[in-house]
Image (tube, rainbow, N blue to C red):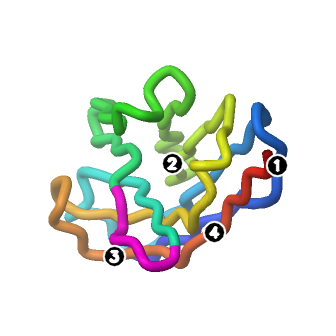
């Protein structure tokens, strides 16, 4: 499966962005799609995930602000990010695989910059 992430940009603190992760190709081994983020000098950090059945998992610091959803007809997973904070600034990447932590494919990152 190939993943294409998009939707990043520059936004002021308190603003919103919606990231998209579009999947193409064979998806028979894909049950989970997740978003991770990374800042320079740091390890990639889990943000959110969603399974094919719709079960979601969110990092504690984004609960109440971020929502992950999927449109199976469009093979796309969305990360709606509201009330953005400067500390949310990072490169966000999506990944897909049979389960969380076992990813077969990564998309390229999309940069989110939140100004104070």
Residue pointed to by mark 2 = 77
Residue pointed to by mark 3 = 105
Label 3: few (<14), some or many (≥20) within 10 Å?
Answer: some
In which quadrant is the N terminus drawn? bottom left
Label 1: few (<14), some or many (≥20) within 10 Å?
Answer: some
40 w.r.t. 11: above or below: below
Q: Which residue is pictured at 17% across the width and 61% down the height?
A: 101
Q: Nearer the viewer, mark 1 or mark 2?
A: 1
Q: Is residue 34 left or right of residue 19?
A: left
Q: Is residue 49 left or right of residue 21?
A: left
Residue pointed to by mark 1 = 11
Q: Is residue 41 left or right of residue 80?
A: left
Residue 15 belongs to the span the image colors magenta: no
Q: Secondary structure at mark 4?
A: strand
Label 4, label 3: how many angstroms apart (C-alpha)?
Answer: 16 Å
Label 1, label 2: how many angstroms apart (C-alpha)?
Answer: 21 Å
In which quadrant is the C terminus drawn? top right
Q: Which residue is pictured at 61% across the width and 37% down the height?
A: 80
């Amino acid at each position: 499966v190939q993943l294409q992430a998009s939707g990043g940009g520059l936004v002021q603190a308190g603003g919103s962005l919606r990231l998209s992760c579009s999947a193409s190709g064979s998806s028979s081994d894909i049950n989970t799609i997740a978003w991770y983020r990374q800042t320079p000098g740091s390890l990639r950090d889990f943000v959110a995930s969603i399974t094919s059945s719709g079960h979601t998992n969110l990092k504690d610091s984004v609960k109440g602000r971020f929502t992950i959803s999927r449109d199976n007809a469009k093979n796309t997973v969305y990360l709606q990010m509201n009330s953005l904070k400067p500390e949310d600034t990072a490169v966000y990447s999506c990944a897909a695989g049979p389960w969380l932590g076992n990813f077969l494919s990564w998309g390229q990152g999309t940069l989110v910059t939140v100004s104070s």
